[in-house]
Image (tube, rainbow, N blue to C red):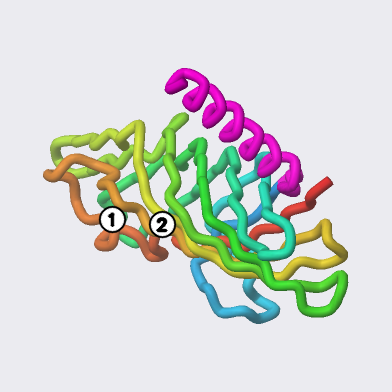
């Protein structure tokens, strides 16, 4: 009897899981965007002087129907450049792979138009660059760490049920260098980009 009950509960759980997955709306898409040094939304936000880097990659979205809650995951290749204010240092351009996994809420306003908010953690893997070098009498090099973590939060609009335009804030939760390295804020004219503007197209 106990075995039959356990078997019944297992079959019921699998059936409910299959129903949940079948009723979910799954979409795949492509994303591209710029890291920006100024988060003010105006005509200059994508000006060349405001751009610090870019990212591009693939996205998958899973949304529950009606309620508007769901999840989103992406794999993004990114390139980041730095503007130094101190001639005593050199900071190499940074290439990375970022994997954000986020909770997403969508609000439909008028048919083909809506807004969304998103928040969640990300993992970041260094591919190359990001090393800080001191040009003093003794050359010292501080290697960028190969792995980092943080969180993303953002909001934007959805147009025609396929196109999303959003602005995202990114906050690192791990240090880029060992404790004896200089503070990046003392070396950079612009902070390493914490804001990005992205365009996503869902198929």
Q: Residue at x 25, y 47 (%)?
A: 175
Q: Position of residue 60 (x, y in %)?
A: 67, 43
Q: Which residue carries the number 2 mark? A: 192
Q: Which residue carries the number 1 mark? A: 184
Q: Nearer the viewer, residue 152 or 39?
A: 152
Q: Position of residue 106 (x, y in %)?
A: 67, 66
Mark 2 surroundings: few (<14), some (14-19) or many (≥20) residues within 10 A:
some
**In the displayed structure, would residue 58 be above or below residue 160?**
above
Magenta stretch: give its range.
1-30
Q: Residue at x 65, y 54 (%)?
A: 33
> In this image, 168 relative to 44: left or right?
left
Q: Position of residue 91 (x, y in %)?
A: 36, 45
Q: Nearer the viewer, residue 158 or 111?
A: 111
Mark 1 surroundings: few (<14), some (14-19) or many (≥20) residues within 10 A:
some
Q: Secondary structure at mark 2?
A: loop
**In the displayed structure, would residue 5 be above or below residue 86?**
above
Q: Nearer the viewer, residue 132 or 89?
A: 132
Distance in Å between CA atoms under marks 2 and 1: 8 Å
Q: Position of residue 170 (x, y in %)?
A: 45, 59
Tag 2 near tag 1, CB within 8 Å: yes
Q: Residue at x 59, y 38 (%)?
A: 75
Say which mark, if any, is on residue 7.
Answer: none
Q: Give the number of marks.
A: 2
Do we see residue 67 in this rendering? yes
**In the displayed structure, would residue 165 be above or below residue 28?**
below
């Amino acid at each position: 009897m106990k075995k039959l009950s356990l078997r019944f509960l297992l079959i019921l759980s699998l059936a409910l899981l299959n129903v949940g997955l079948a009723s979910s709306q799954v979409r795949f898409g492509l994303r591209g965007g710029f890291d920006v040094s100024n988060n003010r939304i105006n005509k200059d936000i994508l000006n060349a002087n405001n751009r610090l880097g870019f990212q591009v990659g693939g996205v998958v979205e899973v949304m529950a129907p009606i309620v508007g809650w769901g999840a989103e995951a992406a794999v993004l290749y990114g390139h980041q450049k730095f503007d130094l204010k101190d001639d005593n240092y050199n900071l190499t351009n940074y290439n990375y792979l970022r994997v954000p996994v986020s909770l997403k809420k969508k609000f439909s306003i008028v048919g083909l138009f809506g807004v969304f908010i998103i928040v969640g953690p990300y993992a970041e893997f260094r591919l190359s660059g990001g090393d800080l070098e001191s040009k003093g009498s003794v050359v010292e090099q501080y290697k960028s760490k190969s792995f980092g973590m943080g969180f993303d939060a953002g909001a934007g609009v959805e147009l025609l049920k396929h196109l999303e335009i959003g602005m995202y804030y990114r906050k690192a939760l791990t240090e880029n260098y060992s404790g004896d390295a200089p503070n990046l804020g003392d070396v950079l004219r612009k902070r390493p980009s914490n804001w990005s503007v992205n365009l996503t197209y869902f198929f």
